[in-house]
Amino acid sequence: MQLSASPYEERLTAPRTWWLMCLLVGVAMALVLLPFGTLPLLGGLVGGTAASAVVVSSYGSPRIRVVGDALIAGEAKIPVSALGEAEVLDQEEARAWRTYKADTRAFMLLRAYIPTALKVEVTDPADPTPYLYLSTREPEKLAAAIEAARAESRGTIQEA
């Protein structure tokens, strides 16, 4: 697999305020264990903070990448040749497409704390998925990377 001319990578990390909430969960656990003494209090602080941090970290761990001739979004990997038009969604359109306009067959890599998104049509007739909905902080760059990878894969196919 060749690297594309304009590779793209983005991690959908959780906002900073969520990490503050992890600390607050630890403080709450410490307060619950306060009547049992200092050692349980410290254990609750460390354990509650660590457990909630693991949850936040795993929720904020998916990546969106355009590598070679493939788009990798979370666990999904799809060749760019099977993708059609990419539509940049602003905050209002993104909300509409993740609520009342959504298709239940669509692949949605959705993070509510990211207001913008990219909707990419799937053109493969063998794939029942009509489109990909990808929450992204930089939808224009992702659309450009997909288009560049698609143009590069077309050029590679035509050369052969």
Image (cartoon, grey):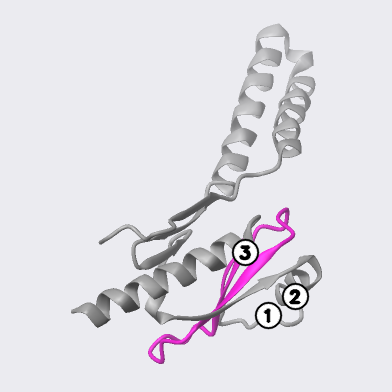
Find disc 1 in the rendering and name its residue: 102
Query: Toward the viewer: 30 or 94?
Result: 94
Is residue 50 depicted above or below 148 in this figure?
above
- Highlighted range, magenta: 107-135
- In percent of width and height, residue 101 lies at 73, 82
Residue 124 in the image: above or below residue 62: below
Task: Give the CA distance from mark 1 to mark 3.
Answer: 21 Å
**Front position among marks 1 and 3:** 3
Label 1 vs 3, first from the N-terminus: 1
Which is in the foreground here, disc 2 or disc 3?
3
Residue in view at x 66 percent, y 28 percent: 48
**Residue 60 lies in the magenta-colored region:** no
- Kind of residue sitting beneath label 2: Thr
Q: Residue at x 72, y 27 (%)?
A: 23
Q: In which quarter of the image is the N terminus?
A: bottom left
* Residue 155 percent across, percent down from the top left: 31, 76
Pointer 2 residue: 99
In the depicted structure, whether residue 41 falls above or below residue 5: above
Q: Dot 2: what SS? A: loop
- The local secondary structure at tag 1 comes to loop
> Is residue 74 visible to us here?
yes
- What residue is shown at x 70% (from left), y 71% (from top)? 89
In which quadrant is the C terminus drawn?
bottom left
Q: Which amino acid does label 1 sit on?
A: Ala
Along the line of sight, the residue nearer the viewer: 67 or 95: 67
What is the spatial separation of the Cα atoms under label 2 and label 3, in whole angstroms? 22 Å
Tag 3, which secondary structure? Answer: helix
Residue type for callout 3? Glu
Q: Which mark is residue 112?
A: none
Q: Name the residue under label 3.
A: 140
